[in-house]
Image: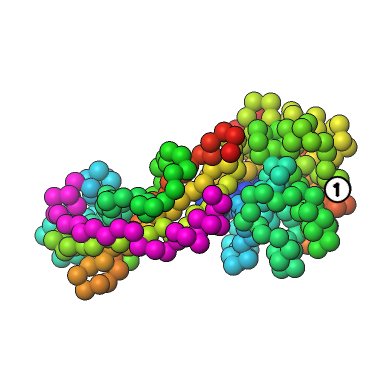
């Protein structure tokens, strides 16, 4: 299937929704793993205690692609990008909604590759957008296609 | 004047370098280039303005593009708004002949890059389907080349009488300044670069063995 067809059919259509709990111990563990030393990330008694900006990269939806997305090959992880919008506080429940944000192709030494950018937008109970997480998948074109 | 003609910033999907950090690296490491060209993948970055950065660091920062054709990847220098409307820069199946024709018609210059590279270089396609009319310059030194890819590129240039350029193909800061192109006079803007390339008086340089 051509990329333009995939874009028309699948872009910007929510395909998953999932709730997440922001646990204080997970925030502290993540901050330690990142090597954070600022008290706002490491000390729960700090008045501005929050999760490190990339914490939301830990959240995963129930699926990475829409249920009716065609099988193009085995997708491999091609990186993540987190765009923090508001501080993430302990104990605040978040809801993540996922859609395909971009589909594009490129050519390289190994041939043609298709990149799928799955975007999860995380909202707090007041429906404020707190973070945007882009997960990139790459699928190598099968030989002969 | 020495310009590194092939680099990518974070505006490219696989670029990990900020333009400011390229400037800082060039100055800190005293890399002997006078400037560089940002050739973002499958697009022309019309939005970014690097003039303040260029002034601050005393460097010439120009913009081009790297598009994908049926004969591999191709650098475009001297991209104008008129050229942007002539074909889809995002396509990975552009006919090279069309890219060259449109570039020439709109004052730009098309330079097939890393021609010795598998699949995305021109050499293998030329061997299979023959040369394309209108090619005058190819990149003979590429900072990302492996093994004998640059030698293959130089052999292609020699065989068909192409002029050769050099560019680092940097995607991370420390890779800028591995290859470049020396011009006899000063170049101040994209149109001037295209003119200098058309004039044909330039020399490709590689510092890869020193890095």
Quadrant containing the C terminus of chain B is: top right
Residue B93 picture location, percent across and down: 67, 49
- Determine whether the residue tagged by mark 1 lies in a helix, strand or loop: loop
Q: Chain of mark 1?
A: B
A12 vs A88, left or right, is: right
At 75% across and 59% down in the image, what residue appears? B78
Q: Position of residue B119 (x, y in %)?
A: 65, 36
Taking the magenta stretch, the answer to whether it contains residue B157 is: no
User: Relative to B197, is B67 on the left or the right?
Assistant: left
Residue at 69% from the left image edge and 30% from the top image edge: B149
Observer able to see residue B88: yes
Stretch in magenta:
A1-29
Whether residue A6 appears in magenta in the rendering, the answer is: yes
Residue A108 vs residue B173, the one in the foreground: A108
The image position of residue A140, as x and y in percent, is 51, 39
Residue B95 lies, with reference to residue A48, above or below; the image says above
State the residue at coordinates (72%, 53%).
Answer: B76
Q: Is residue B27 visible?
A: no
- Residue with the mark numbered 1: B134
Nearest to the observer: residue B209 or residue B69: B69
Q: From the top left corner, tell me how far across and down residue B180 is, in percent.
A: 71, 43
């Amino acid at each position: 299937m051509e990329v333009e067809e995939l874009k028309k059919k699948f872009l910007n259509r929510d395909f998953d929704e999932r709730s997440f709990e922001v646990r204080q111990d997970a925030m502290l563990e993540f901050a330690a793993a990142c090597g954070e030393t600022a008290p706002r990330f490491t000390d729960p008694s700090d008045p501005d205690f929050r999760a490190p900006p990339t914490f939301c990269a830990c959240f995963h939806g129930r699926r990475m692609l829409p249920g009716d997305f065609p099988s193009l090959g085995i997708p491999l992880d091609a990186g993540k990008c987190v765009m923090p919008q508001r501080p993430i506080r302990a104990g605040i429940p978040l809801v993540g909604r996922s859609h395909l944000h971009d589909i594009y192709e490129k050519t390289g030494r190994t041939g043609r590759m298709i990149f799928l950018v799955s975007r999860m937008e995380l909202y707090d109970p007041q429906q404020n957008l707190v973070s945007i997480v882009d997960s990139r998948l790459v699928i190598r074109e099968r030989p002969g296609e | 004047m020495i310009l590194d003609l092939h680099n990518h910033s974070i505006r490219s999907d696989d670029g990990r370098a900020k333009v400011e950090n390229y400037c800082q690296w060039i100055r800190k490491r005293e890399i002997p280039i006078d400037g560089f060209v940002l050739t973002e993948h499958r697009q022309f970055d019309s939005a970014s303005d690097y003039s303040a950065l260029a002034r601050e660091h005393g460097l010439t920062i120009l913009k081009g593009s790297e598009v994908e054709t049926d004969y591999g990847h191709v650098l475009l220098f001297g991209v104008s708004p008129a050229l942007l409307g002539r074909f889809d820069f995002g396509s990975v199946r552009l006919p090279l002949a069309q890219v060259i024709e449109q570039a020439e018609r709109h004052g730009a210059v098309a330079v097939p890059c890393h021609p010795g590279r598998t699949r995305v270089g021109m050499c293998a396609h030329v061997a299979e389907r023959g040369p394309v009319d209108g090619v005058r310059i190819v990149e003979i030194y590429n900072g990302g080349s492996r093994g004998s890819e640059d030698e293959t590129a130089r052999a292609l240039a020699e065989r068909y009488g192409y002029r050769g350029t050099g560019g680092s193909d940097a995607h991370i800061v420390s890779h800028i300044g591995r290859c470049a192109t020396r011009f006899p006079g000063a170049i101040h803007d994209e149109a001037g670069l295209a003119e200098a390339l058309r004039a044909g008086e330039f020399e490709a340089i590689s510092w890869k063995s020193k890095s």
